[in-house]
Structure formats: structure tokens, C-alpha cells
Image (spheres, grey):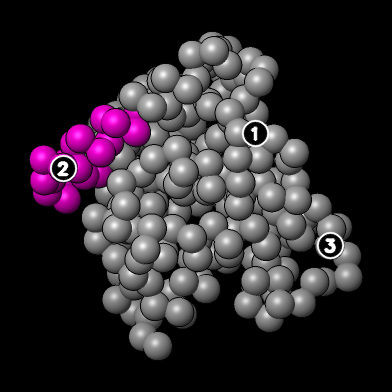
Amino acid sequence: MQLTDSYFDDLCVRIAHQFSSTQSYLTKKDIETILIDRIIPSEVAVKDFYEVDNIRFVIEYINNQRHLDKEISFEELFEIHYLLMNRIDSSRGNFKSESNKLDGSDFQTASPEETPILTKQWMDHINSQLRTGMDNQELIELVAESLITFEHIHPFQRGNSETGQLALIFILLKEKSAPFVIESGDKRRYKRYIHEKNVKGLVSLLNEKISMEENKIANYKD
């Protein structure tokens, strides 16, 4: 699914607002000023600007038809992480080198040694399932399972939840489905489903969010 310019701008703003670690002072209007007006508000720190500005580069990448025609691979996954963490984290685009964990959980994620093979298995499973042909509900179930697996691998030192969501948005766009945006009011529910590996619960949430995006897409006309 290719996104219209007006919907693309709105999607970038909403994703950046939800991903931003500085939501306590960066308003949605601030983010619109950065991403749409291309102006940096005087009170915004450089690092916070980068964090917001990087979202546009990621969404442009995953909305490019040349990339949508490909199966997901290390190339696409590393590039999504690189663009997301560019100018922020020196380890961008590389697997983690130290152990890490899910935020708010004692769950042990994959070790740095296990990470490459588990991530390869994760991608191979997605690609093999997509090759079989899937209806919309089967696709959403695959996305939910894949989000949970990715979060429990936690392959990067930082930015795992964001990278996982963006990678699965890429899969949805590739399959001509609307994306999803996990908004602030959804985060506690989303994290609970991830921590508990509750596929059914996450499918329900994704159905809600994708339906909302379908309506937004229908209402945007360039």
C-alpha cells in the first residue's frame, strides 16, 4: 500500500509523537513544526530534534515501492534501525553487543550470541508465511506473533520496540494493508500483551488500530 502525501505527513507526526522519549515537553504541534514546517522550535534540544526527524526517513524508506517489492532481510531490518537511531546511537544498524531486557520486565531476552540466528529465523518465518498467501486476519495474526517474538529477542542495544513496530508496518504495507500506530493510551495494554506473549490480545489491539488507520486513509485525499 502506497501512502498519499497528506496521510504520510500525518502518520509521521503521530508515530514520532508516540516514539519520542521527550513527550513530557514535546507536543504534537512541536513535532508538526519539525516534520511538516521543517522548523526547529527554539526550545528543542538537538538530540530530541534528531529523534523526531529520523522518523520521516524511516517512513520514507518503508513506503518506497522498491523496498516493498522485497522480502524482509537483514538489509531492510538494519536500515530501519540505522535510520531510526541515526545521529543518536553509535551502535545503529548493528546487533546488540551486551545483554538487555524488555522495559518493565525481568524477562531475559536473547543473548548477543543467540541474536543473529534467532533474528534470521524470525525473518525466515515471516517470509515463508507470506509466500503461502494469507487473508487479512491471518496477516494480522502473523504481525502480532512477530512483534512478540521480536520484542523477546530484543536484537538491538536500543530502539527495539520502535524498530519492531516499524518493521511490521513495513510488512503490512508490503501486503497492501493499512499500518498501525500504538498511541499513548494503548501502551500499557500493548506492553502487557508483549510481556505475557498474549497473541490473541495483541491481535485484538492491532485490529482496532488498523481499522482506525483504514478510516484515516479513506479520509485523506491529495
Which mark is drawn over residue 131? 2
Which residue does the image show at 24% across and 55% down from the upper left?
Answer: 175
**Circle 1 — which element?**
loop
Per the image, is 139 magenta? yes
**In the picture provided, is 187 more to the left or to the right than 68?**
right
Amino acid at circle 3? Val
Q: Earlier in the sequence, mark 2 or mark 1?
A: 2
Q: Is residue 107 above or below residue 130?
A: above
Spatial distance from mark 3 to mark 2, Cα to Cα?
A: 45 Å
Stretch in magenta: 122-140
Placement of the N terminus among the 4 image quadrants: bottom left
**Circle 3 — which element?**
loop
Query: Which residue bears the numbered disc 3?
Result: 44
Which mark is drawn over residue 158? 1
Badge 2 density bin: few <14, some 14–19, many ≥20, Cα 10 Å: few
Q: Give the residue at the far right of this rendering.
A: 42
Amino acid at circle 1? Arg
What x and y, as percent, mark residue 27?
A: 70, 63
Query: Is residue 50 visible to us here?
Result: yes
Which residue does the image show at 81% across and 53% down from the upper left?
Answer: 47
Amino acid at circle 2? Arg
Spatial distance from mark 1 to mark 3, Cα to Cα?
A: 22 Å
